[in-house]
Image (tube, rainbow, N blue to C red):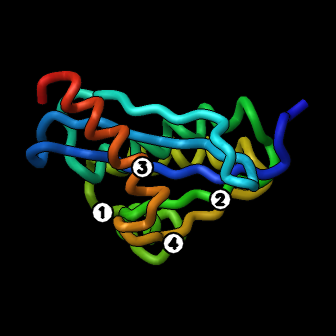
Amino acid sequence: MSKFQKVFVVTDGASRGNPGASAIGYGIYDTDWGVVEEKGECIGKATNNEAEYRALVAVLERAAHYCKDEVVHYSDSELLVKQLNGQYRVKAGNLKPLFEKVSKLRKKFASVKHQHVRRTDKRVARIDGLANEALDGAGQ
């Protein structure tokens, strides 16, 4: 049985160089914004958009341990959100497999909504910090 009926997830990808050394950050929160899980980790060489997608893959894989119903995703990546909401097509060959993986992971939940927020949003800023701390810790 799932622990939560609804969770909020926040993702961010960071790339130093494009492509270059990259990291992801994500957070999973209950509906009161209580922390369920947060993480930042290096992912090797990637573009900024690959890092954004890989952060979403990671958080959806983890969120499935806590919730099967509703996921509300917040990201400062306009490209990511608009591609997932069907407003933009996925043209870049490097993003197509990641888009397909996200599409499969979304099927684990009754509902997944993607919302674009400003980079200055405090939730995204925290997760951006986790991704950049991972890069800093790796000497990147």
Number of numbered discs on residues:
4
Q: What's the residue at 84%, 48% (across, down)?
A: 5
Q: Amino acid at mark 3?
A: Arg
The residue where tag 3 is placed is: 126
Residue at image position (19%, 31%) is: 136
Q: Which mark is residue 86?
A: 4
Mark 2 Cα-neighbour bin, 10 Å: few <14, some 14–19, many ≥20: some
Residue 62 location, quadrant: top right
Of marks 3 and 2, which one's residue comes earlier in the chain? 2
Viewed as shown, does residue 14 lie left or right of 140? Answer: right
Distance (Cα) linking label 3 and label 2 = 17 Å
Label 4, residues with CA under 10 Å away: few <14, some 14-19, many ≥20: few
Residue 122 image label: none
Judging by the rendered image, the residue that carries numbered circle 1 is 91
Which residue lies most toward the top here? 138
State whether residue 78 is above or below residue 68.
below
Looking at numbered disc 4 in the image, what kind of residue is underneath it? Answer: Gly
Q: As drawn, is 133 to the left or to the right of 125? A: left
The x and y percentages for residue 75 are 45, 60
